[in-house]
Amino acid sequence: LGMFDPPERVPYAQIPYSVNDCAEHRALALQAARESIVLLKNEGSLLPLRGDLRTIAVIGPNADAELVLLGNYNGTPSVAVTPLQGIRARAGAHTEVRYAQGCELAGTSTAGFAEAVRAARDADVAILVLGLDQTQEGEEGQREGVAGGGSSQGDRVGLDLPGVQEELLRAVHATGTPVVLVLLNGSPIALNWAAAHIPAILEAWYPGEEGGTAIAEVLWGDYNPAGRLPITFYRSEADLPPFTDYAMAGRTYRYFQGQPLFPFGFGLSYTTFAYTSLRVSPEQIAPGESVTVTAEVRNIGPREGDEVVQLYLRALEPGGPAPLRALAGFTRLHLQPGEARTVSFSLSSQQIARVDDSGERVLEPGTFEVSVGGGQPGPGCVVGRFRMG
């Protein structure tokens, strides 16, 4: 990378800021943020927001924070759009947008709760922007440029929202105003109370310089969310093996036998997709051969949108420890209402093989199950089988 070379010898140092921060790059940052947002819950179709809202309350320690948008190992944009800024720009002059921080990210003071409750009490909707930031997750002691010269606390010791954020969420929910929870974070959070009581939840991660604009577009339905979780949201750290257990048994979605809060690969949409016509060909293969899996996906809802089609594989007769499920392929499609498309996946012998205790890939005879759908195997997916050997 040339990090220790003189700048004149480093090609990256010759790229002017006008290129790094050009309109095309900002457009790419916006599209990346849009595509990464995951809709976790949308009870009663609270989202997308109506266009005739008179008053919106925007509350939370991450609502107007710039640094949290960028995550770790980031560049420095000339402008970063916070969720509050994005919401104000999208709401327009006819809608009053009230802001209250409510609490510090990890503080214990509830002094700001009263202001937050006042802002939410007679609003049409309250949008709470909570979560984590670089001080809560990162490398131990690293400096992140936070106000006051704070540093990262390193590995998290729990999965709950830090400080009094959940108490703030409960206080605003108690006003009776419909609540949308927007999360900014880089690792899973145990949202048990929120998942049970808050009607709409968006996972926006650390969305980058255009994050506030992307969040607003999703809130109002200008962009139909289609992101999927790349991690599992557990209900508690008690669901996980001890951190010092280096056997690694039971970790990740492939081996977890419990009931996660939100599973790996999960994500909702403002439209609905249906899967039919699964075909597995051939139905029996020999070592070295591959199998083709096809299925039809149709947008049966009222809106255009993306669907992330996922293929999972499971050995029904494993000769040793094997994943309960394993993502074997995925593709992202854009479908208009009523439009259907056939998707095709190819599974090689290497993908079908199991890794044994010595770290070697072993191709064993037996029956394998494949599932194609918008998430892990379950309702709405289409399922088929083939045999090896």
Image (spheres, rainbow, N blue to C red):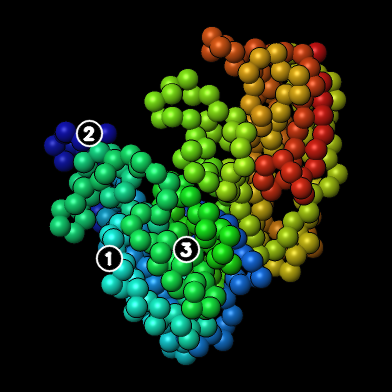
Disc ID at residue 354: none
Disc 1 marks a residue whose amino acid type is: Ser
Q: Is residue 17 above or below residue 89?
A: above
- Residue 356 horizontal side relative to residue 182, left or right: right
Element type at mark 2: loop
Q: Which residue is painted at 27% across and 65% down in the image? A: 109
Task: Give coordinates of residue 74: x percent, y percent.
Answer: 31, 49
**Mark toward the viewer: 1 or 3:** 1
Q: Which residue is painted at 44% across and 54% down in the image? A: 205
Which residue is the site of mark 1? 109
Task: Give coordinates of residue 275: x percent, y percent.
Answer: 79, 49
Q: Are marks 3 and 2 in contact (CB under 8 Å)?
A: no
Which residue is the site of mark 3? 182
- In the rendered structure, which disc, 1 or 2, sits on the residue that comes first in sequence? 2
Q: Residues within 10 Å of mark 2 (few under 14, many from 20)?
A: few
Element type at mark 3: strand
Disc 3 marks a residue whose amino acid type is: Val
Q: Quadrant of the N terminus?
A: top left
Q: Is residue 4 above or below residue 163?
A: above
Which residue is the site of mark 2? 2
Q: Residues within 10 Å of mark 3 (few under 14, many from 20)?
A: many
**Mark toward the viewer: 3 or 2:** 3
Q: Which residue is painted at 36% across and 41% down in the image? A: 157
Task: Give coordinates of residue 301: x percent, y percent.
Answer: 75, 65
